[in-house]
Amino acid sequence: MKRLSLILVVASLVLCLFSCKNEYKNVDGAMMKFYSENKNNEMPKIGDLVLVDVTQKIADSVIFSSEIFGEPFEMVVEEPTFIGDIMTALTNMHLDDHVSLIFPVDSLFYIIGEDMPDFIVPGTLTEMDIKLNKIIKAEDYEKAILEEMEMMRSQEEALLSLYYNDDKYTITEDSLIIVKMNRGKGRLAAPSDIMRVFFTFQTINGDTLLDFTQGEPYELICGDKALGEGFSEGLSLVAEGGDAEFIIPSSLAFGSEGFEGVILPYTSFVLNVKVVDIMTAEEYEEEQNRMMEQEKKENEKRLQEEPKKIANYLKSHNINVEPTESGLYYIETQAGDGDVANVGDNVSINYSIYNLDDVLIESSEDYGQTLDFVVGNNDMLPAIEEAVGYMKVGGKSRIVVPSKLGFGNIKIDDNLPANTAIVIDLELVDLQ
């Protein structure tokens, strides 16, 4: 409570100063500036649905805008989450009003329970430009939802009847529809068995929600109903080595509730599955222990061979520098002419990571933006932290990194297993 009180006290002081300069006024705790006000028009109440144009900024940077979607943003008016938020503003607006709302961005991070990024100064104000375009009363909104739900239920019922009334499909006692089935020659899974499967989970319209058909098979526990009873039942019908296709009605999936706004109510699904392997929990544990022991031996072997591999890389690339005290090999490839990074500075870098076979593992170019971090916060690989300390803005370097200064005993992928030395090309782009 002390933290929230402090935020509100500081925010009040900041907002009072800000409002005096910019014609903002305190309306039930919300600092608002009215560009247009229509006092004779209706006002929204809790539970109403409103259509608004919203643009949110921090300083001059737009962080959200309904213009991106090309249409007003729909929002149900709720009780305020914190003093002076958008809900406070909406309940003090009239239809067709146009306002600007400001509040400290600290409030948002406090409510979601996350720390603010280091580059945002506490007390920084965020501005929301809001235009109230339409108000749909709560009772009308609820009626519309019920009508839409009934329409969706009827549509699903009509769709499923095409399958239920067709003799070429097999229907289980629970109304799961078997479209095709190659049962397989192995054993069926019992509850708590570990299954390795390839599968896709799609809507009837063809929208793919889950696709586990590439790479290693997906591992799951037989009887797990996280994706619904129909998903679990379908898997239990396919033996080891078999494959099948099922239609899963919403009654065996997410029903009339849907799922967190992502899956609509009364949504049927198509499940395609291939069962690769079935093991008991004991067999699975034994296999995992064998794999862990084998991986441990391979990791130890790589660690023993690392000095020789680094030496071979340095020789083959004509690198003749001595390692630093930590064991890092630092090669400046372009001198910078800007500032030197110090502890606490926020730096921006470009990077490319290679293994000792010159295979590119990852690059900041893949993301189209620099990587930013605060020097000394230990949020970055030790090798990069150290190397940046030797550079000036505008400079470039190549570093040969022993695994203890890189990813250590963490496996990144098949090209970069645990205890593997790496090579990184760095560019110090900017610092704050």
Image: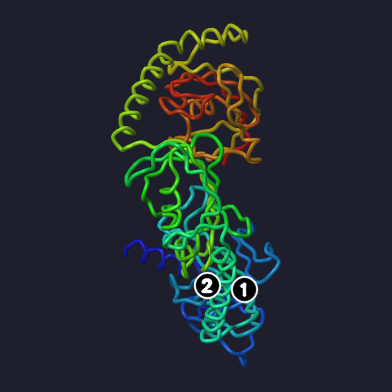
Q: Is residue 256 left or right of residue 134?
A: left
Instruction: Tell me the quarter of the picture where residue 148 sits.
Output: bottom right
Q: Which of the two labelled residues, at mark 1 and mark 2, occupies the earlier sequence position?
A: 2
Q: Nearer the viewer, residue 122 or 20?
A: 122
Q: Is residue 14 left or right of residue 71?
A: left
Above or below residue 202? Residue 314 is above
Q: Nearer the viewer, residue 46 or 377?
A: 46
The answer to whether mark 1 and mark 2 are in CB contact below 8 A is: yes
State the residue position of label 2: 86
Q: Is residue 32 left or right of residue 197?
A: right
Graded by Cα atoms within 10 Å as few (under 14), some (14 to 19) or many (20 or more), the crowding at tag 1 reads: many
Q: Nearer the viewer, residue 277 or 348?
A: 277
- Could you tell me residue 37's position as x and y percent? 64, 85
- Could you tell me residue 202's position as x and y percent? 57, 54
Above or below residue 225? Residue 96 is below
- Could you tell me residue 422's position as x and y percent? 53, 21
Q: Nearer the viewer, residue 126 or 135?
A: 135
State the residue position of label 1: 130
Q: Secondary structure at mark 2?
A: helix
Asked whether the viewer can see residue 154, the reply is yes
Looking at the image, what colour scheme do you see? rainbow
Instruction: Tell me the quarter of the picture where residue 425 sits.
Output: top right
